[in-house]
Structure formats: C-alpha cells, structure tokens
Image (cartoon, rainbow, N blue to C red):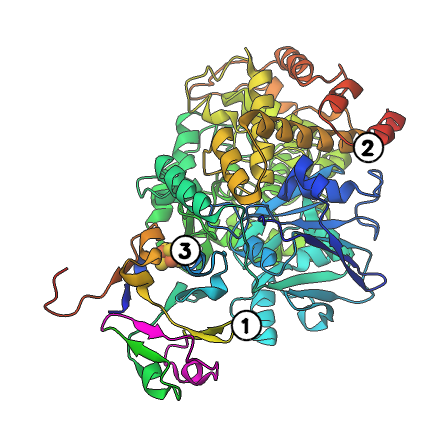
C-alpha cells in the first residue's frame, strides 16, 4: 500500500476517447509526481517542435505522490505543456484544494490531447469521466464559470479549473483559475486549453488516499511541521502572506518600479503587507496546510484572494500605481479574465515606457490606472490595441523595437525582483526552463535578504544550480515553496507515504534529473545558451537608489557566471547537457537518443 | 459534549477532517470525516461553516433497532445491531451522520481526546464543557 492512486487518465478530445492507464511506477521512481511526472508524461510520444496551439500539444495535469495526505502543504496540482508564449516546456502549479480533489477521484494524472469540435468541459469524478458541452459557459469569466458549474452539477465541494475569455481568445499569457482565486498563472497554459476548445475541468472525488505507514507519517509530519514552525502564528507568511515582501524589496532597492527603471517606489507603503492587512477580511489555507498564507481582502468595490507579491509589483509599482484598491482591482480582473498578472503587467509596463520615451505611441502611460483596467479587457478580448498587447512584451518589441525595455526572458515576463539588486536572481531567471520566473530558484533569500553578498557572482552558479535541483524535487513531490523543508525531511515524508528509501542525495539527484529533462526538451525545441539572456536594461543602466545604487551589473561578469553555472551542471559551453551527464542521471535511453539527433 | 468551533480562526485546511478519517479508517479521506468544514466565497469574503455532531441524541430516538446509545459524552453505535437502514442519516439535523460500509457512523470524540482538536493548527476546535463541569 502506498500513496499512489495507481492510474492516470488519457483523454483525446478529437476522438472523444477516454482511457485509464496504469501509472508507470518507473516514471514515479525517476520523476516522482507533479512537475516531474508531468514533464515525463508530456514527453511520451511527443515532438518538442510541436506547435503549442495545435491539437498535438498536450495538457498534462499531475497530482503529487503525497497529495491528499495529512502532510502539510503537499497537495499542489501541476499542469504541464509546451508554452505558446515561450515555446519552452512549461509547468505551473496551483495550491488550494483542487490537487487533493483530483487525487480523490482515483487518478494520479490526466493527459489531454486533441481538440474538441465545440466548446466543452471535462467532468471528472471517482465514478465517471465525461466530455460535456460548454456552450453555456462561452465567453464567461472564470468566477462565473466556477459558480455556473457548481450550480449545474449541484455540489458545493466541486473544484473547477477554468479559463476566461483570454484563454478562449488564445492570449499566449492566459492563465487558469482554480476555485476562483487560485491561479495557475504562467506560460499561457489556458491558451492551450482554449486551442483545444476546453473551457473548464470540473473535479469531484470521494475516494481516500492510503499511505505506506500511516502512524509513522502522522507522527513524523506533526513533529517536523512543529519544528519548522509551519503552524506558528508568528510565521510572517501566515501573518501577511507574500505581500510582506514589498518592504523587503523596497529596502533592498530592487522593487521593480515603472518597468524596472527604478528599484524604489515612492508609494511602496501604500501597497505593502501592512496596507493589505488593513483591509483583510479572512485568512485562507490550502488543503492540509498549516501555514495558511492566503488573504481575502476587500477595499472599496474591489476584492480578491491575494494579492500576492508578484501581482502587487507588476500591477502596482511597475506600472507606477500606488493605489491599494486599484491593485486589488487589477488582480481581480486578471483572475476573472484569465490573464497572468505578471505577463499582463509586464507587457503593459513595456508599452508605457515605449510611449513615454516616444519610441512608439501605445496610448498608455505610467500611473494611468483606468487605462490599465481598460487595457486588460481589451487584451482578453483581443480588441483593438489589446490585440497587440496580447502578443506579450517580447513579440511586441520584435515589432516596435525597444528590446531593452521588454523585461522578459524567453518571452516570459519577469516577476518582481530586479536582478541588479540580487545578482544571482539573473542566473535563476535565464536558466529557469519555462523562461523568466522566480520559482526554479530563489537565491534572493540568501543574497539581498540573507548573508551572502548580493553584488558578487562568486560561487553563485553553484548556489543557483543546487537550489534548482532541490526545488525541482520538492515541487515534484508537491510541497509548497513556503515550507523551507530540507531534503532529508522531504525524503523521510516521501518514504512514509510512498515507500522505498529516499535519502537526501537521492532527492537532490531526482531534482537534478527533472531539471535536465526539461532542459533537454528545450534544447530539442531549438533553445540553447543564446536564449539564456537578460533584457539589455539590466546590463546597460544603473539603479540610482538603495544598496544597488551605481553598481554595474555587467554583461561580461554575467557571462562568466553563466560559464561557471554550465560547467557545474555538466553542460557544454552552449548550455546543453552532455550525454555523459544525462546517462549519469539515469535519463531514459529513448530520450537520450532523440536528444542526440537534435544536437 | 459536542465540539465547539471558533470559525473566525478557521482557514479551511481540512487537517481536522484528515486526522479524523485517518484515526478511524487508516485512510486520508475528508469524505469519511465525522466533522466537515465547508468554505466558499460570498460577497463578504470567505464563508466557513462547520458540520458536526451537536449531541442532540435524535439518532438514538429514531433508530428502529436500538443500535444507537450515548454515554453522556458522545454517541455510541452498536455495529452488530445497525442494519444500515439510513433512518439516523435522514433524521440527523446537521446531516453529519453517514453510512460507512453500511453501518451508521457518528463522532465518538475519539474516546474523549478528539484528533481534530489535536491536529487543527489554528486552535479552532474545542470541547464544549457542560455548565459547572471542571475544564
Ligand atoms: S483543521 Fe482547524 S483550521 Fe483547518 S479546517 Fe479544520 S477547523 Fe479549520
């Protein structure tokens, strides 16, 4: 007995064929669940050169092996695809209760390919799986889809993954809302769903999850969550949620302001953790989570669960907007339309800077709150100027110039940390497999907010790679970022849930394997070192306030750090994993063969 | 001696339900918990409601087989006598009784030390003491 459900669901929307497959144990052993298993399922019989919006692309939903158990914050759900925004492999995860719900239907994962003839939704329960007509949901925002499906199916415990008009209209940075207020934000997976005519996935499961050693797991789980202060009310993440980071970034002079032109925002206090706490109505926790970082806030006419730090920055300081109510409104509208707050904000910020610099008139300037709100609806509906903005900052800069001001990596707009204030964040951004993202590694915690020198690359290639390896296994095991769990504890929890021996070095290796698998995918999709680069702004312009003031973040120093990173990873000078490395990691032969051909 | 909830502190994590199903059935399944925490949004924010045995003893009165009794603190089901007729389920005012493997299932306060109380990270749940009883 272990915590795997033992089967995964395969759905072909073109042929309407629905089939149960056994979850291959060898895949779980190599890649565990969630992110890792999702990548593995995506790559099965899949050409990385596939057009992301073609029926051949896959949407893979994965739970985690510890999902549905009592292990704190371990029930996240991942979705993996080839991104229409970056063209890379792209996985995102979402907390809340949906991951556990899917597991309780009896499935470890769901693979969706093909394209439905008409707009449809999936209904997945422990008793049946159906492809149903979604005409009545057409054009609706994600909040309304959630409510309508609960009404239609008549179950308040139904969990809904929904796309909004942005996903239906194939905006390449359209996001998925889960239970209304949790977003699977990045990389445009909602556009892939839209391209498949798939409006929503409604999930309800009533089965249970068994584990290898239930008594041992409960005892150990309690011990380590208490030890790591996961359940402590003094935990800052519990008290303020991620909005606590606004003060940190401001202090460190790396709070993206007016499209990363500055690192300090004059109105930061109006949109910091305390400010949002002042309008907080409730706290909300994800399934099995003792932390409960979620906040439900109401300010004037605006309300949202959040806003999370990244949305505060990309919808606030980076747009020159220091208005709490409007930041909440920005967040809520993006959630409802199904737009990634980071990419939407990043793209609009680029347009504002281009307009202000007189390089191209997009008709929108920093601080113009109402124009921003208006733009979001236009983007989701691809209406007029919104159809341009829907391209994202990279494609827009290809068309209108100003590449240095398109703050993205591989097309994915950057989150809320200026790398000039914490140098290794730059390495993390350019090496994250899905493009400019902060989730593969978070060295800022050790640098700008920790003990290490934020303005030095000394040893940072190794630091970032080590963090990525551990994170990739931790996420694949479904554990949330906010539990600073060590590899040993993670392995022990996994052993008690799933079985086998998972010492710390195996956890690290597993993460390294998954990271390399994703890198292989990208290499086969045509990427290499040349795309591992930051927008020109960071190397050409100096920040003018706070700790990073006047410190140059040179391209030369950065390139040298990248050399170190590749070499530590066992990759060649073009950033490609070597065959020896892949063999050492035990990556399956058939992938190595395909990879060799692509080199 | 029913459970008491301070709902203003509840975050909806369901650790209480997981602890309940684990301690009674060796499985993690919120559906099989003998208490339920239900959360949803309305215009005022997140609404949390609790469902649990209120110790009204109605089930004891309506059971046609005399399978349900109480010890002054919690309800007791005699599985030998229970025929799975569903009468207690349909008559339960809080809709918390359910059948598990065709037998009535009611909160037994884990024999006096409820696991839900032990596992709730936010101190939401406690035991409602009788007036005058020692705490
Ligand atoms: S464990 Fe506590 S906080 Fe979590 S759902 Fe139960 S009562 Fe609410």
Q: Write the start and end of the magenta stretch as one range.
A: B72-95
Front residue of B108/A464: it is B108
Extreme residue toward the right, this view: A597
**Labels 1 and 2 share a subunit:** yes
Which secondary structure type mostly characterizes the magenta part of the structure? loop
Question: Which residue lies under the disc numbered 2?
Answer: A591
Q: Which label sits in the foreground, 2 or 3?
A: 3
Residue A230 placement (x, y as % from top left): 39, 40
**Labels 2 and 3 share a subunit:** no
Membership of B78 in magenta stretch = yes
Q: Is mark 1 within 8 Å of ligand 1?
A: no
Question: Which residue lies under the disc numbered 1?
Answer: A155
Residue A460 vertical position relative to residue A101 in the rendered view, above or below: above
Extreme residue toward the left, this view: B132
Q: Which label sits in the foreground, 1 or 3?
A: 3
Q: Do callouts 1 and 2 mark residues in contact (Cβ within 8 Å)?
A: no
Residue A431 placement (x, y as % from top left): 66, 26
Q: Is residue A270 visible?
A: no
**Labels 1 and 3 share a subunit:** no
Tell me which residue sits at (60%, 17%) in the image.
A461
Q: Do callouts 2 and 3 mark residues in contact (Cβ within 8 Å)?
A: no
Count of labels in the image: 3
Find residue A518 and report its image quarter: top right
């Amino acid at each position: 007995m272990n915590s795997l459900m033992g089967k995964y669901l395969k759905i072909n929307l073109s042929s309407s064929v629905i089939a149960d497959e056994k979850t291959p144990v060898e895949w779980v052993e190599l890649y565990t669940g969630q992110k890792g298993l999702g990548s593995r399922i995506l790559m099965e019989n899949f050409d990385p050169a596939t057009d992301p919006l073609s029926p051949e692309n896959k949407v893979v939903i994965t739970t985690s092996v510890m999902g549905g158990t009592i292990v704190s914050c371990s029930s996240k759900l991942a979705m993996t695809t080839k991104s229409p925004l970056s063209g890379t492999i792209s996985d995102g995860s979402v907390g809340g209760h949906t991951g556990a719900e899917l597991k309780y239907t009896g499935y470890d994962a769901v693979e969706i390919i093909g394209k439905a003839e008409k707009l449809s939704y999936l209904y997945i329960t422990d008793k049946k799986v159906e492809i149903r007509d979604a005409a009545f949901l057409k054009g609706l925002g994600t909040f309304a889809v959630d409510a309508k499906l609960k009404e239609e199916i008549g179950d308040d415990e139904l969990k809904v993954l929904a796309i909004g008009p942005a996903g239906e209209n194939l905006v390449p940075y359209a996001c998925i809302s889960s239970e209304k207020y949790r977003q699977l934000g990045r990389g445009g997976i909602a556009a892939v769903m839209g391209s498949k005519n798939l409006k929503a996935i409604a999930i309800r499961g009533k089965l249970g999850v068994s584990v290898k050693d239930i008594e041992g797991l409960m005892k150990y789980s309690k011990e380590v969550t208490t030890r790591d202060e996961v359940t402590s009310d003094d935990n800052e993440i519990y008290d303020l949620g991620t909005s606590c980071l606004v003060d940190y970034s401001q202090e460190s002079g790396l709070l993206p302001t007016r499209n990363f032109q500055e690192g300090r925002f004059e109105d930061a206090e109006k949109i910091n953790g305390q400010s949002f706490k002042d309008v907080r109505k409730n706290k909300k926790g994800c399934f099995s989570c003792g932390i409960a970082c979620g906040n439900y806030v109401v300010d004037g006419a605006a309300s949202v669960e959040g806003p999370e730090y990244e949305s505060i920055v990309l919808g606030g300081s980076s747009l020159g907007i220091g208005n709490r109510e409007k930041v909440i409104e920005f967040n809520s509208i993006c959630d409802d339309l199904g737009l990634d707050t980071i990419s939407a904000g990043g793209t609009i910020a680029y347009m504002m800077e281009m307009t202000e610099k007189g390089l191209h008139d997009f008709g929108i300037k920093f601080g113009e709150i109402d124009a921003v709100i208006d733009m979001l609806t236009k983007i989701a509906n691809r209406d007029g100027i919104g159809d341009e903005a829907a391209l994202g900052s990279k494609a827009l800069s290809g068309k209108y110039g100003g590449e240095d001001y398109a703050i993205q990596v591989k097309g994915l707009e950057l989150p809320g940390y200026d790398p000039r204030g914490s140098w290794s964040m730059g390495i993390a951004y350019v090496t994250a497999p899905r493009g400019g993202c902060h989730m593969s590694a978070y060295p800022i915690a050790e640098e700008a907010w920790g003990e290490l020198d934020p303005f030095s690359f000394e040893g940072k290639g190794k630091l970032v790679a080590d963090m990525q390896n551990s994170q990739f296994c931790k996420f694949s095991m479904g554990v949330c970022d906010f539990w600073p769990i060590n590899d040993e504890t993670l392995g022990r929890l996994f052993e008690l849930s799933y079985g086998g021996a998972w010492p710390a070095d195996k956890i690290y290796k597993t993460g390294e394997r998954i990271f390399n698998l994703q890198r292989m995918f990208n290499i086969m999709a045509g990427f290499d070192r040349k795309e591992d680069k930051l927008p020109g702004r960071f190397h050409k312009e100096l920040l003018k306030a706070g700790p990073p003031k006047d410190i140059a973040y040179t391209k030369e120093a950065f390139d040298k750090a990248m050399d170190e990173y590749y070499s530590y990873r066992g990759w060649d000078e073009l950033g490609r994993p070597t065959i020896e490395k892949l063999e050492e990691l035990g990556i399956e032969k058939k992938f190595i063969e395909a990879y060799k051909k692509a080199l | 001696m029913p459970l008491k909830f301070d709902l203003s502190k509840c975050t909806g994590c369901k650790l209480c339900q997981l602890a309940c199903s684990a301690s009674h059935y060796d499985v993690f399944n919120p559906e099989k918990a003998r208490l339920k925490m239900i959360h949803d949004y309305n215009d005022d924010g997140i609404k949390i409601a609790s469902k649990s045995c209120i110790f009204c003893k109605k089930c004891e009165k309506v059971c046609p087989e005399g399978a349900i009794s109480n010890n002054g603190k919690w309800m007791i089901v005699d599985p030998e006598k229970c025929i799975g007729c569903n009468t207690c389920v349909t008559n339960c005012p809080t809709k918390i009784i359910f059948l598990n493997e065709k037998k009535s299932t009611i909160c037994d306060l884990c024999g006096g030390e409820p696991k839900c109380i032990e596992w709730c990270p936010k101190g939401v749940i406690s035991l409602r003491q009788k007036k005058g009883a020692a705490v």
